[in-house]
Amino acid sequence: MTVSTPSPLTSDADWWRSAVVYQVYVRSFADSNGDGIGDLQGIRERLPYLRDLGVDALWLTPFYTSPMVDGGYDVADYRDVDPMFGTLGDFEAMITDAHALGVRIIVDIVPNHTSSRHPWFQAALAAAPGSPERARYLFAEGNGEHGEQPPNDWESIFGGPAWTRVPDGQWYLHLFDPAQPDLNWRHPEVRAEFEDVLRFWLDRGVDGFRIDVAHGMIKAEGLPDVGFNSMTTGRRQSELLGKGRLPYFDQDEVHDIYRAWRPILDSYPGGRMAVAEAWAETPQRLARYIGPDELHQAFSFDFLDATWSADSFRKVIDTALAESTIVGAPTTWVLSNHDRQRHVTRYGDGEVGLRRARAAALLMLALPGCAYLYQGEELGLPEVLDLPDELRQDPAFLRTGESRDGCRVPIPWSGDLAPYGFGPAGSELSWLPAPATWRALSVAAQAGVPGSTLELYRAALRIRHTHPALAGTDGITWLESDPGLLAFRRDTGGAVLTCVVNTGDAPVLIDGYGQPLVASEALTERDGGHLLPVDAAVWFERR
Ligand code: BGC
Ligand code: MG
């Protein structure tokens, strides 16, 4: 161990049960050196902003040494920082400052695959079929007379076959880009390596891990066919994500890996945690990743996928809360991340989308459990839909025409000219261009402005942290309400907070829940009650 940054936060080992975690897409958050690319020093400089926003922790997307074929989810060295983002020293300085400000740090770990530039894969390519070097990955012989067909019908999540052939005729598996070869997790060296990588970052003080493709590391024995793919039926296998079974995802044996990881996390002080990016057929199977002997959390993507309707929200909230009660862990709510269209745009874009996104934030932040925010949602940023194709970098774009670049555009901080303070003063570079409309959405344009999205988030987070009614981790009580309306109560120790969301098509008069604390749109007083506009949410309190 080299450096340790003892956190002043170690006393609360259960912090993750109700935390608000802010996802930093490192490349697009803040650029300290003017090369147009966000970096660790940029994050460090903006820590006071994040503390003032009121978040408990940051989740940093991968900043490790990488050829950046998939935005850093193709790791060539798991124990170092890519020069694009800074140095290990920058990481240590950043985490020390974060802890001093009371902000925890969660880092991404990418165990399903390495980069094709990783020394292990380079060694595998240089070695012969059947060699120990190849055994750490999933190499196989092809089908057909000369092995010219892939070993099975598996499809990459990014489109096209999940197999690539090497010059000696063998094929290797890559569930994502060909530059992301899948590791063989039945190999003891692979397991030992990642346990050591966990310790490497835990020794540097990280408070937790976000586990990339946490459902993917074990593949069904014999690598059986799925039975269809876009080549044979036009239907993509990835359509089954979160809905069906695939032989390369959510295999029972994957849980052995987490049962080995948990004691490592538990051997460090201060509540080191792990959150799974996992996709499973049912909420029940997803819940199997969580528990005292496995992981602490798994993202509730059903909440992210819910459409803008009271019914749809209520259904996913009830299911998620029921599952979390069974496993004794909080639900992990999320509305946006670096892989999905921003929720302003999903909910209708433009003014309507923004109103709904603001209301959804009040909904999410009133729920018990942990909430993950994606950078820029506190500014009400929409998806950038009109990026020129030649600037798009997502490897999925070339294979499927779908691109995740539109939610990865650098954050606007201040000023009148793009990239709006993303870099140091005078810097005009940013790896993706921000649209002109983002001038009005910058942090500086919204800070201190009553009614701005930034001030709405700040107010909601302040209340969430201090209001006694939200202190508990108990469930919610639904209140009877008109269709189109979502109304529930949280209460602890005599204080009551009621959250009401109007997804219907007419304003609704609300009476009897006490005083409004924060609302996503202005309320009007009427007949002793309050009129809640369409596409809006409000918190009331009664003490
Ligand atoms: C990450 C993606 C990434 C993929 C492959 C994920 O689910 O969130 O951004 O492309 O894993 O690592
Ligand atoms: Mg930079």
Image (cartoon, grey):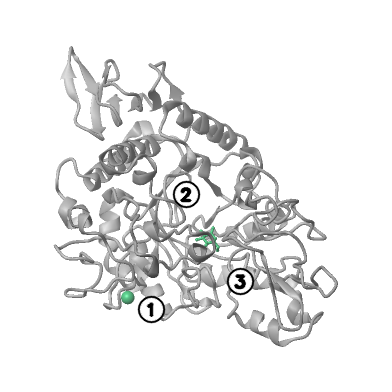
Taking depth in this image into account, of 148 and 534 the one nearest to the observer is 148
Residue 221, above or below 514 = below
Label 2 SS: helix
Where is residue 34? Give x, y as percent: 26, 77
Taking depth in this image into account, of 79 and 246 the one nearest to the observer is 246
Instruction: Find out whether the residues at labels 2 and 1 contact each other: C-beta distance under 8 Å.
Output: no
CA–CA distance in space, label 1 to label 3: 27 Å
* Residue type beneath disc 2: Trp
| Residue at image location 66% in from the left, 64% down from the top | 161
Residue 86: mark: 1
Earlier in the chain: of badge 1 and badge 3, it is 1
Can residue 290 be seen by looking at this rendering? no
* Residue type beneath disc 1: Gly
Q: Residues within 10 Å of mark 1 (few under 14, many from 20)?
A: many
Where is residue 266? Give x, y as percent: 59, 57
Taking depth in this image into account, of 120 and 144 the one nearest to the observer is 144
Question: Which dot, 2 or 1, sits closer to the camera?
Answer: 1
Question: Which dot, 2 or 3, sits closer to the camera?
Answer: 3
